[in-house]
Image: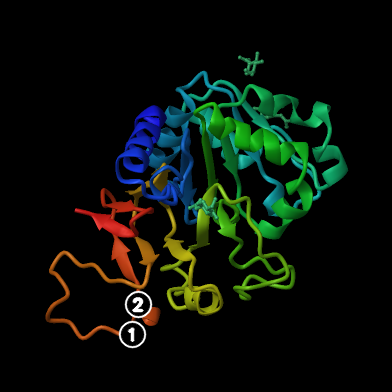
Amino acid sequence: MLKKILGFLAATFFTFGFALPTIDNSTTTFVGPERGHLVIVGGNLQNDVIWQRIIDLAGGSNAPIVVIPTAGGEPSYNSNFSSAVTLRQLGATNVTVLHTYDPAEADTDDFIAPLLGAKGIFFGGGRQWRLVDAYAGTKTEKALQAVLDRGGVISGSSAGASIIGSFLARGDTANNQIMIGDHTVGFGYLKNTAIDQHVLVRNRHFDMFDILRAYPELLGLAVDEDTALVVHQNEAEILGSTYALIYDGGFWSREGSDLKNLPAANARFYFLKPGDKYDLGARKVIE
Ligand SMILES: *[C@@H]1O[C@H](CO)[C@@H](O)[C@H](O)[C@H]1NC(C)=O
Ligand SMILES: *[C@@H]1O[C@H](CO)[C@@H](O)[C@H](O)[C@H]1NC(C)=O
Ligand SMILES: *[C@@H]1O[C@H](CO)[C@@H](O)[C@H](O)[C@H]1NC(C)=O
């Protein structure tokens, strides 16, 4: 492929004497992971279909899966953290709970040992800034990226969904109502995005605009409870119980939009239901 592109560029250059055009990398850089998958859940994860998809994308019931409960803020965690128990009940045989609040510990080889062979990661809910304080910039963060690079899955629910975006929505340590808080950088497995959760159950559907007014280049994604975005490269599919909301400045409806009176582009959002697919690169519904 690269050879073909270089060949084309060389032919263009020598045939017409044009200066080499700027290489358009928009088709070679994906918004989501090039290898592996993301499963981004809007909180209150009950649906076995979503849990099962996480197990399947990790490689099946024997795949090593690491559950990270750190967002929850409890004084300590053991191997029976609820999400780990659920994964085991659904047949996953190799589930490890990994936790620290101490970035120095998160930066050690001993701590990251369970991540080195992992094919699946699940971040539990709570406050997303705790994940940043514990793991950002450490060996743990690198080892998490490596799970995707070897074709695995990174998943998370609620706070564990928001951490997957590049902009950290609701990252304030004071409370969960400040959309642009004292922590604004997520782990960025989904580039150029802000991810909100619990959106319909908690009537959060206008909150994303607090972020988009300040950062209009971001794609806003808000996922309702017990619902997931499953992402590979530029494709996101909605899975689970209710809806995901898309804030891309556009509008989409099964019945078209010609006869609708829509708000201004910077005040629009629209819903996608389970089975719908969205192109994160083109920022368009896949019809
Ligand atoms: C494409 O490449 C340019 C220049 O190297 C860089 O600034 C830009 O961020 C890249 N775009 C993407 C989507 O990665
Ligand atoms: C986890 O639960 C199992 C089954 O109930 C129990 O045997 C085990 O002792 C528990 N482990 C911890 C660390 O609490
Ligand atoms: C779980 O997976 C790890 C990493 O691949 C491996 O080292 C370990 O032996 C596995 N444990 C079980 C019980 O299969």
State the image quarter where residue 77 is shown. Answer: top right
Residue 27: image location, x then y, percent: 38, 46
Q: Nearer the viewer, residue 168 or 170?
A: 168
Residue 80 visible to the viewer: no
Distance, label 1 to label 2, CA atoms, is 7 Å
Q: Which mark is residue 264?
A: 1
Q: Amino acid at mark 2?
A: Arg
Please tell me which residue is depicted at 37% across the width and 65% down the height of the picture.
245
Q: Tag count in the figure?
A: 2
Q: Nearer the viewer, residue 211 or 83?
A: 211
The kind of secondary structure element at disc 1 is loop
Please tell me which residue is depicted at 26% across the width and 52% down the height of the picture.
276
State the residue position of label 2.
268
Residue 180 visible to the viewer: yes
Q: Relative to 100, is 207 above or below?
A: below
State the image quarter where residue 78 is shown. Answer: top right
Residue 150: image location, x then y, percent: 54, 26
Please tell me which residue is depicted at 19% across the width and 53% down the height of the picture.
287
Find out whether the residues at labels 1 and 2 contact each other: C-beta distance under 8 Å.
yes
Q: Which mark is residue 133?
A: none
Q: Residues within 10 Å of mark 1 (few under 14, many from 20)?
A: few
Q: Relative to 170, is 15 above or below?
A: above
